[in-house]
Amino acid sequence: MARKKPKANSCDCQGVRRSRRRDAVLDAVLASGGHLSAEEVHREAKKKMPGIGIATVYRSLKCLCGCGKVAEFIPPDGVARYEAAGSRGHHDHLICTACGCFAEAVDPEIERLQERLAARHGFKLEGHRLEIYGLCARCAKKK
Amino acid sequence: MARKKPKANSCDCQGVRRSRRRDAVLDAVLASGGHLSAEEVHREAKKKMPGIGIATVYRSLKCLCGCGKVAEFIPPDGVARYEAAGSRGHHDHLICTACGCFAEAVDPEIERLQERLAARHGFKLEGHRLEIYGLCARCAKKK
DNA sequence: GCGAAAATGATAATCGTTATCATATGGCCA
DNA sequence: TGGCCATATGATAACGATTATCATTTTCGC
Ligand SMILES: [Mn+2]
Ligand SMILES: [Mn+2]
Ligand SMILES: [Zn+2]
Ligand SMILES: [Zn+2]
């Protein structure tokens, strides 16, 4: 029978040791649909690592963002949210102002026009944030 | 000699009384180039109203945002910034990641494509936030 | 297994913003 | 021109997400 393959360290960074709690944090983000707050990640991670503290969740998320496994984004309410990154590419968010749900979208034309806009102003583009607010289909119907 | 015309209330809302401090807060925002934090507004407003407290600045800003004289936006650092609104229309921001300066821009094509993007996802668009991060011309040159 | 370095949990600290509350002020009306 | 009462104000406590601190535990190359 094949020997169980040792799982890779959830963070690749130099000097970072493997830890079961950081693994649990990554798993929680990956297993979810994304857009979890740190507190929500904490709640999920506790299912695998009951004693894990909120400080470790924050530290792990920062680490996982640093090595590109997780992406952070900060909606206008100021509470950071986390989602899987790495294999998944960049995307923008449509946020329902009624139910708070998130949809994901990329429009290549918008992306391209942003580069043009930056160039026009002499900016060397590094990144951007686009959030569209409105009513999702379900909430729009309810009204 | 013409009698001095009484200045209009800086807030039009029902039940809101005129106050010299709210006037000073509005003046501070209008006189500045915009993008001031509440603390910066406080510093400016104190030049006209030396005893004004930070709580009154926050209250005034909220009031002035409510009646459309001032616009608030919240960069990723979570610290709200304020600028003149009303006569000035919507615009997006280019933010220098080196010096923190802001540039303003509107691209009608991007605005239009955002509506299309929202429609594609069944969203009833209410608003959006677009921030472009990068190096401003000056900072790019320094490098 | 040893030991140095990294990770952890409990909790204090931070910091922008809001809530509280006693006092001051604005402005309608007599 | 007061009087009255709702609104505005300042000082300060409270809030909440996030970060810093520090004593203890865990990791992993040897
Ligand atoms: Mn997403
Ligand atoms: Mn602006
Ligand atoms: Zn919705
Ligand atoms: Zn710059």
Image (cartoon, coloured by chain):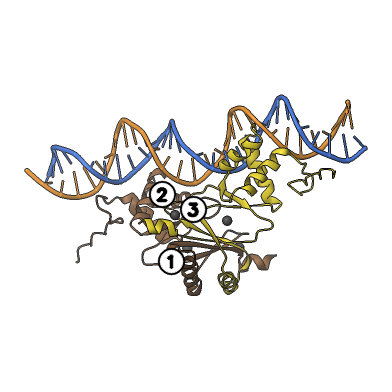
Chain colours: A yellow, B brown, C orange, D blue
Residue B53 visible at all: no
Distance of label 1 from label 3 (alpha carbons): 25 Å
The percent coordinates of residue B29 (x first, y second) are 41, 58
Residue at 59%, 61% in the rendered image: A91
The percent coordinates of residue B1 (x first, y second) are 19, 66
Identify residue for label 2. Answer: B46
Residue A66 visible at all: yes
Q: Are marks 1 and 3 in contact (CB under 8 Å)?
A: no
Identify residue for label 3. Answer: A101
Q: Is residue A125 above or below residue D25?
A: below
Identify residue for label 1. Answer: B90
Residue density around tag 2, few if under 14, some if 14–19, many if 20 or more, within 10 Å: some
The mark lying in front, picked from 3 and 2, is 3
Residue density around tag 3, few if under 14, some if 14–19, many if 20 or more, within 10 Å: some
The percent coordinates of residue B70 (x first, y second) are 39, 58
Considering depth in this image, is C26 or A38 the residue closer to the camera? A38
- Tell me the amino acid under the disc marked 1: His
Number of numbered discs overlaid on the protein picture: 3
Q: Quadrant of residue A104?
A: bottom right
Residue at 50%, 74% in the rendered image: B109
- Tell me the amino acid under the disc marked 2: Lys
Considering depth in this image, is B52 or A126 the residue closer to the camera? A126
Q: Is residue C21 above or below residue A61?
A: above
Ligand 1 quadrant?
A: bottom right
Residue density around tag 1, few if under 14, some if 14–19, many if 20 or more, within 10 Å: few
Considering depth in this image, is B9 or A66 the residue closer to the camera? A66
Considering depth in this image, is C15 or A118 the residue closer to the camera? A118
**First in residue order: circle 2 vs circle 1:** 2
Q: Taking A120 as reference, is B121 left or right?
A: left
The mark lying in front, picked from 1 and 3, is 3
